[in-house]
Image: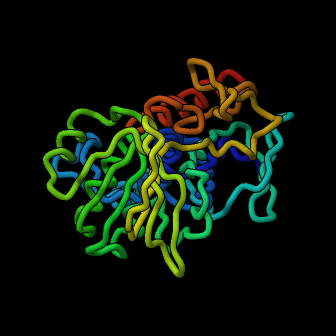
Amino acid sequence: MTEKLAIIGSGPAGLTAALYAGRAMLSPLVFVGPAFGGQIATTTEVENFPGFPAGLQGPELTAAMREQAERFGARMVEAVVESVDFSKRPFTLTADGQTYTAESVIIATGATPRPLGVPGEQEFIGRGVSYCATCDGFFFRDQEIIVVGGGDSAFQEALFLTKFGKRVRIIHRRDSFRAGATLQRYARENPRIELVTNTVIEAIHGSSKVDSVTLKDTVTGATRRTDVGGVFVFIGHDPNSELFQGQLAMDDHGYVTVDGRLTTSVPGVFAAGEIHDRIFKQAITSAGFGCQAALGVERFLADAG
């Protein structure tokens, strides 16, 4: 059976698209992917999603979004899409060895945290190097922690890590931070956080686990080695677009390009969330893009007949 709509991804964009498509009686098929909920599902305190004045946990938010989408007929498939063929309609998708066809597709595969690319990083992933404070913060009780990055994510995760570490240093290669004013104020007021500018990590050291890093001053070039138990990296993301290389138009950074209605270079294929959004990267904006994409699908299918 050919589906009316297939959605690839289950973060805020994919789940919101599923909700709107379900309400439009499209009975969307949602491929959950390797990690249900996307990045927001690994976040603890979500305080800026409208409708939750007291805040809530990331997994709670995505679980509620899933329940709401399923209430209106969205169907979740616990599978990872391995290949797609957008050369003709209906489009073909292969997931876990099974082939599916769909009249329209919404891509909501998001983005992946970017690594530092320094010696020792890959070696110590899971042994002191992490890209998820929620996942691993508990293991760094009373330890020295370094957070690398200057944006909202770095500050949010650093604030969370103060629950565990005895000191959290946020290091950034530039002389100022990009994080929002409120987050910066929270960090500056927190006695366990130290802000370090014009600094980068040159190498990560250890034996069975991380025990120190080499820091470099980007102004003077001076280096120093400092003891640390955990290194948390939040320096940006790369779009999860490899699956669509050669089939959809992308920018120089691999983000899928879309028009004002979130249509990709292939009519009938839409993109929503961090797979195309290089600027905002918020759960609420991704949800908004998911809504737009679903409305775009509804109009496309009506016009296509």
Q: Nearer the viewer, residue 271 or 128?
A: 128
In which image quadrant can residue 284 be found? top left
Q: Nearer the viewer, residue 245 or 9?
A: 245
Q: From the viewer's perspective, is 238 left or right of 220?
A: right
Q: How is the image coloured?
A: rainbow
In which image quadrant can residue 134 be found? bottom left
The residue located at (31%, 49%) in the rendering is 156
Position in image of residue 116 (x %, y %): 56, 51
Q: From the viewer's perspective, is 76 left or right of 143?
A: right
The residue located at (35%, 32%) in the rendering is 175
Residue 287 in view, yes or no:
no
Q: Nearer the viewer, residue 14 or 184?
A: 184
Q: How many marks?
A: 0
Residue furthest to the top = 260
Position in image of residue 168 (x %, y %): 29, 58
The residue located at (47%, 29%) in the rendering is 279
The residue located at (49%, 50%) in the rendering is 11
Image quadrant where one finds the C terminus: top right
Residue furthest to the right = 87
Residue 213 in view, yes or no:
yes
In this rendering, the answer to whether 20 lies above or below 101 is: above
Q: From the viewer's perspective, is 265 left or right of 64?
A: right
Q: Nearer the viewer, residue 177 or 6?
A: 177
Position in image of residue 140 (x %, y %): 34, 73
In which image quadrant can residue 42 be found? bottom left
Position in image of residue 22 (x %, y %): 51, 44
